[in-house]
Amino acid sequence: MTLRLFVIFLLLFVSPLANAARVFVAASNDYVGIPNTANIGTLLSVSTWVKPASAGAAGANYYFSKGNNTGDVNWAFGYTGGVVRLVYTDSFVSFVVWSYTVTLTVGQWYHLAWTVDWTTNPDTVTVWIDGTQHAATCTLGSNNSLPTTTNPQTTAIGGYVGANFTFDGSLAEPAVFDGSLLGANEIGSLARGERADKVRFNVSSYFPLEGWQATEPDYGVNHLGSTTVTGTTRTNGPPVIPR
């Protein structure tokens, strides 16, 4: 392959993946739904880029979630009313909420990540904002309980499972590292724009959200398919390094 042909290949096939995102409008219930019957383990790391369009009302504005659509939430992450929060439902169907209070500037890109270790007592839950770790606080429910694993489950990008409480803003590069905890170096690489499948090859699920496809492919090892894209539009994303 000549150098000219190689450059053309990069422009046609790599550049669109480097900074694409999807725009979600809370009032329109925009979301991307992915059928998924896999349960999570006792370790979990989740990463995504977010650009809020509003602070969102308390209890709304979720950007990533997994559950069975009947109220049993495996986990849900969002930015609601000035609080970055992790929500899950324990085995007794009681909501557990971990939160970190922070002001995210409207219209600005942030890299957010959570790491959760359910093997410790109390649970070890941390939130990372632009590569900096913060201790989360358990504000509701038990701090030593496992999330429910009732099947079947679906994963929702841009909202709470069941297309509720959808995110108001842009999302890019959501990734799930199921069964493992990312370290500071790995999350730092993600926050600097590295792709999830480069940071760790065995990323469980990874959706670049190119934005121009009717369905969104999963570049993770789970290769989840048959996504349902509702109402989202395409925009430029954060400075993600091309594959």
Image: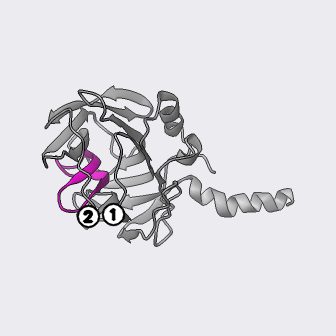
Residue 23 image position (x, y, % from top left): 39, 60
Provide the residue designation for mark 1. Answer: 31
Q: Amino acid at mark 2?
A: Ala
* 154 horizontally vs 4: left or right: left
Query: What SS does tag 2 mark?
Result: loop
Residue range corresponding to the magenta coloring: 55-79
Please say whether residue 63 is one of the residues in the magenta stretch.
yes
66 and 25: which is toward the camera: 66
* 32 horizontally vs 242: left or right: left
Residue 76 image position (x, y, % from top left): 27, 49
Q: Quadrant of the N terminus?
A: bottom right
The answer to which quarter of the image holds residue 231 is bottom left
Q: Is residue 121 among what the camera can see?
A: yes
Q: Say above or below: 29 vs 181.
A: below
Tag 1: Cα neighbours inside 10 Å, few (<14), some, or many (≥20)?
A: many
Tag 2: Cα neighbours inside 10 Å, few (<14), some, or many (≥20)?
A: many
Q: Say above or below: 219 vs 86.
A: below
- Pointer 2 with pointer 1, Cβ within 8 A: yes
Please say whether residue 95 is one of the residues in the magenta stretch.
no
* 203 horizontally vs 233: left or right: right
Task: State the residue at coordinates (27%, 33%).
Answer: 102
* Disc 2 to disc 1, C-alpha distance: 7 Å
Query: What SS does tag 1 mark?
Result: strand
Q: Amino acid at mark 1?
A: Tyr
Task: State the residue at coordinates (59%, 60%).
Answer: 16
- Residue positioned most to the right: 2
Provide the residue designation for mark 2. Answer: 163
